[in-house]
Each structure stands twice: as structure tokens, then as C-alpha cells.
Amino acid sequence: MIRAWMALGAMIVAMCVAAPAWAEIDIKEVTSPGGIKAWLVEEPSIPFVALELRFKGGTSLDAEGKRGATNLMVGLLEEGTGDLDAQGFAKASEALAAQFGYDSHADAVSISARVLSENRDAALDLLRQSLVAPSFPQDALDRVRQQVLSGIRSDLKDPERIASTRLAELIYGDHPYGSNGEGTVESVTHLTRDDMIAAHQGALAKDRLFVGVVGDITAQELGPLLDQLLGDLPETGAPMPAPAQLEIAGGVDVVDFNTPQSVAVWAQEGMDRDDPDFFAAYVLNTILGGGGFESRLMTEVREKRGLTYGVYSYLVLRDLANVYLGSVSSANDRVAQALEVVQAEWARMAAEGATEEEVEKAKALLTGAYPLRFDGNGAIANIMVSMQMDGMPIDYIATRNDRVDAVTTEDVARVARQFLDSDGLLFVVVGQPEGL
Amino acid sequence: MLRRIVLAVIAGAGLAMPAVAEDIVTDFTLNNGMQVVVVEDHRAPVVMHMVWYRAGSADEKPGVSGVAHFLEHLLFKGTDTLAPGEFSATVAANGGRDNAFTSYDMTAYHQRVAADRLELMMRMESDRMVNIRLGEEEILTERDVIIEERNQRVENNPGALFREQLNAAQYLNHRYGVPIIGWRHEMEALDLEDALEFYGTFYAPNNAILIVAGDVQPDEVKALAEQYYGVIPANPDLPERARPSEPPQTSARRMVFYDARVAQPYVTRSYLAPERNPGDQKQAAALTLLAELLGGGQTSVLSQKLQFETQQSIYATSWYRGTSLDATTFNLLTVPAPGITLQEAEDAMDGVVAAFMEEGVDEAHLGRIKMQLRASEIYERDSVESVANRYGRGLTAGLTIADIQAWPEVLQAVTPEEIMAAAEMIFDKDKSVTGWLKIAEEEVSQ
């Protein structure tokens, strides 16, 4: 029972009162003889290496009528390769105590690995087989398909998933972002082994690969190892989808679902990372609903009125769209009041901006908490991959807090006025809300 | 007196594993009885500051379920010197993050901040150990918040409602049968007096453990701890943690839970099981390995038989949570494949366990599990927070530092014979609770 869930995303942030804690993170760019680039932090104090591989595109690359193919394909990478079947692969990775994670989402396929120094080469060779030579055996396909279908059926009865799915449908329409990457019962039921092979070729290619490595390994060792691990992947993959055209018409969309607490999510248009006002919007969001217990939404909806356990807003930066989202859950007879407060806070911020004190506090939180994110080899590898995917310079970490600190109270007020659209908010409410 | 502790990873015979000897953990006790554990990690100038109380929901009196968790929320509401909300606001203003959590055997408060803010955290955390000030009004609002929390975690989730009923059936007499967050009707009646009584009884330095993990030196932690926590008097009336124990279970208990919001039916079974005890962790170690053999991933016995061979399950597993003050449970679960009834799924699960009792432990499998356990100690050092949590959980569950340190070796020393003996002891149907989660047919209203 934790006091609050820090909702996904929105974990960004820092400090102006005093010098922030700073980890000296020495990132090297390594290019393999074969031309594969990686960012590396050498950290020999613990005898293991964390590797993060990310292939841009993800489930949004699914071919027409094949929704869920990328997701299912990624679930099958560890289910058979070369001479090894699923059991053989699992036994081999257990014997090496290697930890491999295979995941997919709307913008990328992510591979996370942790391997011990003592058997690093053997462990990475096993990982290589799963990436470049998965065999997609039919029995594994049928078995994992049942697991995926079970998850899809569960999502259909989960109010939080129903809400996010409905919101995505409304704002993204036919774009891949408008449907779940897991696919539907219908689409997943009909996926074939050939679809898996095609999805693999489309998603795991060198032209969309980003690599972060942290741990007990040197730049000299890493170069050749990258070629061994990834050199056999195809050069190019499936074409990237076009940017999404947002359609956000303000209002309330209720999905009837018999459950005692309504789940509400809302959206308005977002802001691009490259927008000159991005950091002002970022500070603004921290004050409005992204800053945990200190945000205005949390203060007004939870602390003063007790209407919810948690209320949050998030600036969502996706590769093909930017949106500004929020979420709250409240009993069916109280959710209307919660949403009224949310909308009023949106409007108040647009009209008045934030106080000097609020802006300074938000900046302190953002700049101070930023170094806290670099807490472990895996976390740092992850951050380095995201930086590369977002096109950030290798020295970005050292300059990031200055960008936050440069935001003024006037910037926040101006951006709040231009950016926040309280009347244009689209709310989706799942439950049996009274008075909506 | 500082006592240096060596975390040793024991290299296993036949498996190459570097012998790692890390002295990253130090512990000592203040004069007022407050225990302190320091976990060093100097890779980044960050610190995690935690205070764990040996008081959780299972320490509540009957009738006020949820009060331990309610009090946890109220500790953010202000003291003689801090206004409501000022605690978290101050942490945030210093670029940190704070939170708290409650379980059956413990309540913990923690902040992650730059290492040079440790003193400020100690000043505020020691203040709210004994100085909270609460008004009637904020009590009522916060009670609404925890009821919404229950809505979100439990009432909106049929699986959580089902597990609540299963626990209640498992524990007839012990407070582990009562949900941590509380029964709704009792939560609705919680008041200031209930919260303050729990606070006065359990929040004291001699019932608390300070854990500081990160870029700190034990000496510096000790000096600060003495300054801020060491001056708080011990509570001489601290009650002993003697909770009602379970009567012998003499017949199997079963339940079927229906909810229209269920998408995926499943079968689960729990058996009352011994926990890790101070100086006596062998049986718990055997049960830990038994759970891994039966249910730990793709190559486990349940998965191999039910997901791969007969394909009667889409998922099957087992688990055991040995770190517990009082008797815990050993659990089995199977999610039937389409077309398989819950009865067939349960019978198949029982069949796998019966076959395991005949066939015994696959030594190669056990070897792989032990290899992974050794490696997990290396991986764990990447996160001092998980080391800190392991100590906090262990100490609040009645274990000693020595027990926590010895645990990896105790696990490595378990033999196949000990695992089978533990299995013989645990798999007694008369001492089990079996639950089916089913889809209720709802009247269609469209």
C-alpha cells in the first residue's frame, strides 16, 4: 500500500537553491568496425554489463490487417532459435544467469539484457541467436498466442485499459496509435508464422537501431562485440508510419461499465520537444499535475476534497504525435465533481499562470530529481538510448538543468495562456458516473 | 560501536562464479534501541533515507482494520513544526522524492535525495516519529482518500476482491486474514483516536529501524542519527509482537468467486506454511527452492508440464513468501487454456504436484536455480535500494542482521532431500484453501 503511485511518464525533473547532486556520467560513443553505433558508460565496479537495444517503429509497423504481429513476434524471440526450442533457450539462459527482456510498444521494440562478466560472450551469443535467428516454431506461436489473447480479453474488462483504448481511438482514429499494439482477438487469432517472419524483418533492422551499454566492459571490447551481436541483422526494415493527425473535440465520452469507481482520462494537444516553449510547458505541467503531491491538481482534488487517491497530468512525447493527457479515478457519485475541479484548474492556470514561488519550486524539483534518475547501470543504459532516439547531443545531460532553470514565471504564464485549452479537453469516463 | 558486515557470495562447486566479498553494509544500535543499517554505494551522490516501523496491519486491534495504513497517510499531515503537506513539499523543494508504504508486518517512510540533504531528512523524519498534530477536518478528508484508494486497488478489481476472500479463508484467527488497506466498513469508521492510539503504541525509536543507503559514510550517519533520532526516548511500554496464531486446520477450504468483470478464470491454492525464523531458516529455504522448481519460469515443473506438454494451462506458477513475522503461505496457480474447465485445470495441477512427489528433484534444474540466486546478488548491487528493502523487510519480519546475511548460504546449502521433505510437509490438502475465480453471467442491459 504505497501512498501514491507515481504515474507513468512524468518522472522528470530538479533544484536551484543549492548545487544539485551530480553524477559524473562519462558517455563515450563507440562505433563498431561494422558501423554500429553505441553509447557506453564504463562502470567496472560490479561484474556485469547492462545492455539496452531499441529498434524504432515498434508495434506501429504492423502491416494492414496484421495488428498485433510485432507484439506477438517479440514475445516469440525467446521461444526458439537455431537448435534450441523454448525450453532449451530458457535452460541455457538460466545456466548463464543472464537476464533478457523483450518488449514492444507503439514506438519501439526494446531488448534489455543483463549479463555477468564471467560468461559475457556466451550470454551475448545466446542473445544474438534470439535476435537474428528466431525460428518461430508453430507450437510456440500457438502457445504464446493464447497468452496474448488472454491478456487482450482481460484488457476488455479493465476500466483503465478501456479508458485509454477509447481515448486513443477518439484522438488518433485510423492511425496505428488509435488501436492497441497487442491487436484484437480477431486479428491475433489469424496471425501466421509467415506474419511473424515478416514482422521480424520489418522491425529488427540496423537502420532503426539504438544501443546503450553500461557496466564492466571497455570501448575496445564493445566494438567487435556489437558486430557479433547485431551485425547479421538486415540493413533496412519496414517504412515508418506517417505522423498522426490529431482530432480532439472537447466534451465527455462515457463508456458504461459496471464498477464502483469511475476511471477518467483526458486529452488536449501536446507540445513538441523541439518547440522553444517545451521547457516552459514542462515546468507548467509540473505545477499543474505532474509534480506529485505538490501539484495543483493533487492539492485541489485529493488533499482538499478527498475525491481521489491520485490525479496526474503528463506531457506525452511520442515519435508520431504529441499530446497532453491526464487521469483520475473517483467513485461514481463523485467523479463529476473531480472532473469539474480538473477543468477549473486548467482554466485558472490558463488565465492566471503560476506564482513565482510555484515556478521556483517546480524548477527545484525538476533539476534536483534529474540526477536521481541515473540510479543503476540498467537505468543509465535506458536513458542513453532514449537520448539517441530523441536526437539529443551526447552532452545533453550536463546542459539539461540549465534549460529548466532558464524558464521564467512570465514564460509559464504565456505558455499557459497559449497552450492550455480547458474548453477543448476531451474526457473519457469509464464506469457509471452520476451527472455526466 | 560500529559493526562491519561482510556480504559474501559463496562460489558454488563446479560453477564458475567470482568470489565477491563486499563490505557495503554496516549496522549499529542507538542507545534508545533504534537499529541502524547503512548500505554504501558511492557511484552517485545520492542517498535513500528510510525509517521502518515494526508495526503493520497485522498489529492492529480488531475493529480498526486499515488504521496502520491510514496513519501512514496522516504522517504527511503536519507536526508541531511542519504544516500539513510541508514534509513532502520540503523534500520536493530539495529535489527529492518521498513516499511511504504499509504491509502486514511493517510501515516504512522513505526519501530519495542528494546525499548532502540527509541531515534535513533526518530532522523531519525524527520529528514526525513523535510530534504529529492532526485536526478532525483533515482526518475526514484523508479518510475519503484511502477509501478511494481502496476503490482503485480493490473494489474495481475482481482479482483483488477474490484474493481478499481467499486470505480471509486462509487465516481464521491471525490478522493476516484482514486486508492491509482495511475492510471497507471499518475504514469508514476510522477516527482520530484510532490513529493516535496506533501511533502512540508503535511509533518509537525502539520499534524503528533507520536504513540509509547510498553515498554516505557509516560514521557520518551514526553522528547524525544520534543527533536526531538518538534523543527521542524509547517507549518503555512497547508491546510484544505476540499475535493470535492459527488453530490447526483440519479440513480443506474451498470457494468460488463470481464477478462479471472477470475476463480470465483461474484456480489458485494456498497452503499455510512456516516462515523464516531467527536462527532457523532451513525449512523456509527449502520451500523457497521448492517454489522455484515448481513455478519459477519457463523451465519450472508446472510450466513445463501444463503449458508445454499437455497445454492445459496458458500460465501456471507457484510462489512462497518466506519473509514474514508469522505463518505464511505456499501458493499454486493455474490459468486454464480455452476449453479446459476449472475442475480439469485443478486436477491437472494436482497431478503435476503428485508426479513431482514421485519423481523428485531434477538436480540440473536445482543447479541452475542456485546459479541464478548467486548471480542475483551481483545484479542486486546495482540497486542499493533493493539491498535496503531486503534488510527492512527482513528486520521488520523478526529476523536479525545475521539471519539476513546468512540467507544466501542457507539457500545454497539446501539439498534435494530437504526440498522433498518440505514438499511432503506442505502439500496436505486438508490444510489448504482452493479458490476458483469465475465469470458471473451478467444480465445484458443494452
Image (tube, rainbow, N blue to C red):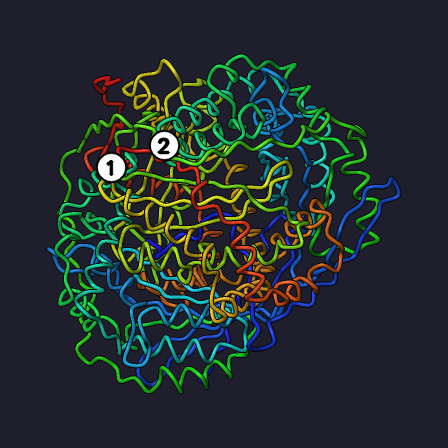
Q: Measured from the top left, where is residue B210 in percent x and y?
A: 39, 73
Q: Measured from the top left, where is residue B155 in percent x and y?
A: 25, 40
- Is residue A430 placed above or below B311 in the rendered structure? below
Q: CA distance from mark 1 to mark 2?
A: 22 Å
Relative horizontal placement of residue B188, taking residue A325 as reference (left or right): left
Question: In front: A220, or B200?
Answer: B200
Q: Chain of mark 1?
A: A
**Kind of residue indicated by mark 1:** Gly
Q: Residue at x 61, y 26 (%)?
A: A70
Please tell me how crowded label 1 is: few (under 14), some (14-19), or many (20+) other residues with Cα within 10 Å: few
Asked whether disc 1 touches disc 2, contact meaning CB atoms under 8 Å apart, the reply is no
Q: For numbered disc 2, what is the local secondary structure? A: loop
Which residue has dot 1 on it?
A435
Q: Which mark is residue A158?
A: 2
Q: Residue at x 38, y 77 (%)?
A: B124
Q: Chain of mark 2?
A: A
Relative horizontal placement of residue B251, taking residue A221 as reference (left or right): left
Relative horizontal placement of residue A22, taking residue B260 as reference (left or right): right
Please tell me how crowded label 2 is: few (under 14), some (14-19), or many (20+) other residues with Cα within 10 Å: many
Tag nearer the camera, 1 or 2: 1
- Is residue A124 placed above or below A19 in the rendered structure? above
Question: In front: A157, or B223?
Answer: A157
Q: Residue at x 45, y 84 (%)?
A: B224
Mark 1 or mark 2, earlier in chain: 2
Question: In front: A22, or A125?
Answer: A22
**Kind of residue indicated by mark 2:** Asp
Q: Measured from the top left, where is residue B319 in percent x and y?
A: 38, 41
Query: Residue A289's quadrant in the figure?
Result: bottom left
Q: Quadrant of the C terminus of chain A?
A: top left
Residue B83 visible in image: yes
